[in-house]
Amino acid sequence: MTEAYIYDAIRSPRGKGRKDGSLHEVTSVALSAKMLNAVKARNGLEGQAVEDVIWGNVTQVGEQGGCLARSAVLASDLDEAIPGLAINRFCASGMEAVNLAANQIKGGAGQAYIAGGVEMMGRVAMGSDGAAIAVDPSLAMKTYFVPQGISADIIATEYGFTREAADALAVESQRRATQAWKEGRFDKSIVAVTDQNGLIILDQDEYIRPGTDMATLSALKPAFKDMGEVMPGFDKIAMMKYPHLERVNHIHHAGNSSGIVDGAAAVLIGNAEFGRAHGLKPRARIRATAKIGTDPTIMLTGPVPVTQKILADHGMTIGDIDLFEVNEAFAAVVLRFQQAFDVDPGVVNVNGGSIAMGHPLGATGAIIIGTLLDELERQDKQVGLATLCIASGMGVATIIERV
């Protein structure tokens, strides 16, 4: 089978995702085009150099609708002969774009792809596209639907994670992200966003809160307690599904959950022939990909079974992995992953994660693949695994190996 290699991985800095955020005036298509232009320029791509652009994007309405991937190609300097495919696997959309591109290459459907994603959460509100699982009673009742924050608190309750443990993970995420930026660990991948005059709009993640400590976080009110216990009373729905739970322990808040931000990321993937033709050296091969469906109520446990699946399918063990990126959608998601596999927290999210830097839904999966690759190179390690939990109960994972 043909190998699929990563030749480049870039991302924008993550904006605050609000009207006072630096990226607020940049549209989804404009930020996407900037990423595509950067890949083209950095790698000397001309003409129909890639087979397709596969672009993850969760809230596909308004400026993010209408096959944003094709719009981004037309807005960029890429050849118009290159098509575009917009995909949505919720929080794993950017990773699924990369995985789909890699598997297309492995199957012989083209020599190279640009894959990644975007989410401008300050411009296109999360959930504004509607969702049958949330609004259609026939499905919501069947699946015991609860919002993701309640799901995260169910995980904490089920697996015994305290508010203090969640807050400690959040504090460490902030510390690691701050250190990573100070040491320039993201320099290889960050593409500063500029205006039409070339002036820098944003060149660093602006969501990070250096100096965050346990005292700061302890003052925050649990974000999902009222919707769970009062109105609309989602805790009762959860306990109908899980009657062994006497109550839901609400431990998550704004400080130990992922931030709502703007951002985009792109990965250049190709076979060996593509690299030779363009004088490019591969940085890693995509060794394995996997996806799985999980319980839609607790919803966010996907990283554990999909990791078990990807390892079993490819004859590997958890000990074969040097570094992990587990998206910090909520603190309990990462705590559960570490608990399930008994992995050293020191090799998980080495440079912080979405709690500190934010989670631009359609882009995050591609972001963490690039972050993982950069860190494998920095530490001179070989094999890394990236994974995300996903709304409505799914998991996706990717294993990369340096070459």
Image: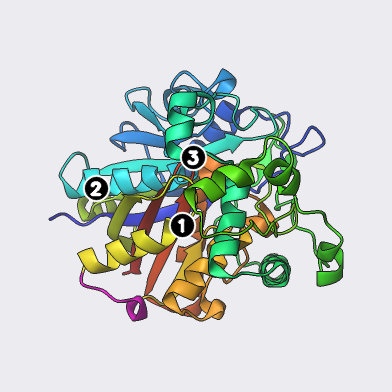
Q: Secondary structure at mark 1?
A: loop
Q: Which residue is mark 2?
A: 103
Three-letter code, disc 2 = Asn
Q: Nearer the viewer, residue 215 or 221?
A: 221
- Residue drawn at (56%, 79%) of the image: 346
Residue 26 percent location from the top left of the image: 67, 30
Q: Is residue 373 magenta?
A: no
Identity, as a three-letter code, of the amino acid under mark 3: Tyr
In the image, the segment drawn in magenta is 315-320
Gap in angstroms between the C-alphas marked 1 and 2: 25 Å
Closest to the observer, 162 or 314: 162
Q: Residues within 10 Å of mark 1 (few under 14, many from 20)?
A: many
Which mark is nearer the camera, 3 or 2? 3
Quick one: quadrant of the N terminus? bottom left
Mark number, residue 301? 1
Can you give x and y, in whole percent of width and height, for residue 56 in the image? 45, 37
User: Is residue 318 a member of the stretch shown in magenta?
Assistant: yes
What residue does disc 3 label? 144
Task: Specify the farthest residue to the left.
Answer: 1
Residues packed near mark 2 inside 10 Å, few (<14), some (14 to 19) or many (20 plus): some
